[in-house]
Amino acid sequence: MAALLLRHSARQCLLSQLRPTFCMRSALPMGTSAKQEMDRYWEKNTRLNRPVSPHMTIYQWSLPMFMSITHRGTGIALTAGVSLFGVAALVLPGDFASHLELVKSLSLGPTLIYAAKFALAFPVAYHSWNGIRHLAWDLGKGFKIPQVTQTGYIVLALTLLSEAGLAAM
């Protein structure tokens, strides 16, 4: 008798798996939905007047924080710049020499040209030096706060020196 009952309940379970509508009377109501949970979360935060996290006004800006954001920004700028330069090289008529002559014909002063070259060299120099710093971190070196700050200042100094050298070319 017990075997028959077990066999019948197993058959019912199998049929409910194959045809969910067959066994709706045994279905249990679900708890709250994800949307209800989210609404409850935001209502609570609004009621308690909590800021949206991360809220930039509650953090004290530090050198590593600034350098991390700048590293990401220079990476995006380099990607966009190289992509645009490549597309422009494919689309624009003429060759590099003709474009160089066009820039020379604008009669820009040496100060403006040096400043433009300095601005173009910044993402390359900064991203390269800070990338070397990140490689050292990947090796597990320099994670103590004084070392992070010290290497940050070293990266900034090397960036300025490299920038000046690249702009002078």
Image: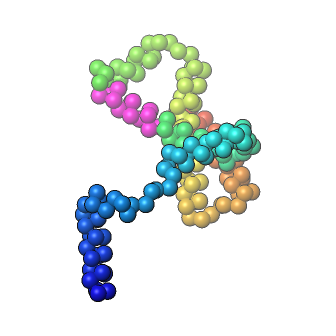
Residue 56: image location, x then y, percent: 68, 39
Residue 98: image location, x then y, percent: 34, 19
> Measured along the vertical axis of the image, is residue 98 above or below residue 34?
above
Q: Is residue 25 at all visible to an observer of this figure? A: yes
Which quadrant of the figure has residue 139?
Answer: bottom right
Residue 106 is one of the magenta-drawn residues: no
Q: Residue furthest front?
A: 1
Q: Nearer the viewer, residue 137 or 155?
A: 137
The residue at the point 49 percent across, 38 percent down is: 76
Residue 168: image location, x then y, percent: 56, 32
In this rendering, would 50 be left or right of 124?
right
Which quadrant of the figure has residue 142?
Answer: bottom right
Residue 84 is one of the magenta-drawn residues: yes
Q: What quarter of the picture does the N terminus occupy?
A: bottom left
Colour scheme employed for the rendering of this structure:
rainbow
> Measured along the vertical axis of the image, is residue 159 above or below residue 109?
below
The residue at the point 57 percent across, 20 percent down is: 112
Q: Nearer the viewer, residue 21 or 104?
A: 21
Q: Is residue 68 at all visible to an observer of this figure? A: no
Would you say the magenta stretch is mainly helix, strand or loop?
Answer: helix
The range drawn in magenta is 78-90
